[in-house]
Image (cartoon, rainbow, N blue to C red):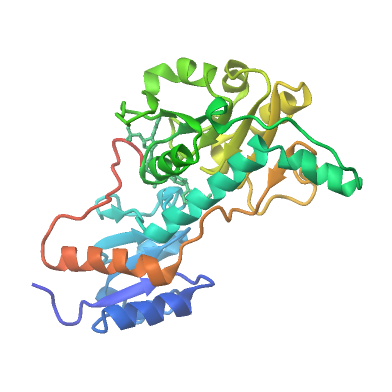
Amino acid sequence: MENSTQKAVILLKTDKDDQWSAYLQQVMPELEVRFWPDVGEATQINYALLWNPPEELFEKLTHLQVIFSIGAGIDGILKVKSRPAHIPLVRLSDKELTNGMVQYVIYAVLRIHRNMVNYDRLQNNREWGFYQQIAANDCRVGIMGLGQLGMACVQALKALGYNIIGFSRTKKNVDGVQCYDQSQLQEFLKRTEILVCLLPLTTQTKHILNKSTFNQLPRGASIINVGRGGHLNENDLLEALDNEHINHAVLDVFEIEPLPQDHAFWLHPKITLTPHIASQTVPASAVSHIVKGIKRHQSGQPLEFLYDPELGY
Ligand code: NDP
């Protein structure tokens, strides 16, 4: 049974604290929302909504019962050494977050498939020119990671007529989509023309986009990385772009963020980059997932979307 003093939520300082606070109060007025580092009586805090928390946070919050990530990736929380491993960590699952990712991946696939990089160049040169239009069905998009986000992208791209193949740890069964498991990476890469990385960053997936991966893709293939910067070996990509094995890369995430001013990616003609905005959490929508989790926890029901330490995601 909940102790009446145990009702606080703590938020880390983010640029959306006001929104989180307002929506949480609206949906669950009995919650008290506090903002790091003003924890007040720290023992009253049972739930933390976090994104890249500082080490000191967990040392203070001795009565924490559940950690909620306010983004789909949890690598920023996992890297904090003081995180108590026994406290359940819940990943974000939210319709708007998924929608945002689907929109971005569609944009990136279209940018590559419909030659928009070259049309940008033509416009810059005031040139009226044409590139051959390839049917979507003749353009094979390989999605790495068939989780919440990857699967939504599969369905959306399939609806646009693309030829989709998928890769995940365990084999999936998706109508009209050839799926490969983690032992079949080579077969998957061999058939992929536009590679979309939507994997979680784990010890197994770090630098999975490397020289060997690129060499297994057909010449002229393109890369879209919306997972994490740690998935990509940046020097290997530069080399593959320079030797023309890889045609173009759309990158939203980077090893170091913000991307350093002098980084070679900024002005590379074969790279389209965005500042980690593929999908941003929308508090108005995501708050219902958090509140549902708190209510499940308070009523003793098992939590959903839990981080699995064995898998690392
Ligand atoms: P999920 O956990 O739902 O899905 C992860 C998928 O990756 C699963 O299909 C899983 O396989 C597969 N996978 C995990 N490890 C491996 C491996 N070693 N080899 C092959 N497949 C593997 O994650 P989400 O779809 O919710 O999110 C994916 C990632 O997207 C996040 O972790 C985050 O890094 C990134 N992201 C980026 C954003 C941005 O703005 N750029 C915004 C939001 C998320 P299986 O199904 O068999 O378990």
Percent from the top left, x then y, of residue 184? 41, 17
Residue drawn at the location 49% of the way across and 51% of the way down: 101
Vertical side of 286 occupied by 78: above or below: above
- In terms of image quarters, where does ligand 1 lie? top left
Q: Quadrant of the N terminus?
A: bottom left
| Residue 84 seen | yes
**Location of residue 15 by image quarter:** bottom right
Vertical side of 269 occupied by 21: above or below: below
Percent from the top left, x then y, of residue 229? 58, 42
Percent from the top left, x then y, of residue 112? 66, 37
The residue closer to the viewer here, 246 or 239, is 246
Residue drawn at the location 38% of the way across and 18% of the way down: 183
Residue drawn at the location 57% of the way across and 21% of the way down: 213
The residue closer to the viewer here, 169 or 7, is 169
**Location of residue 296 by image quarter:** bottom left
The residue closer to the viewer here, 93 or 174, is 174
Residue drawn at the location 37% of the way across and 58% of the way down: 94
**Location of residue 8 by image quarter:** bottom left
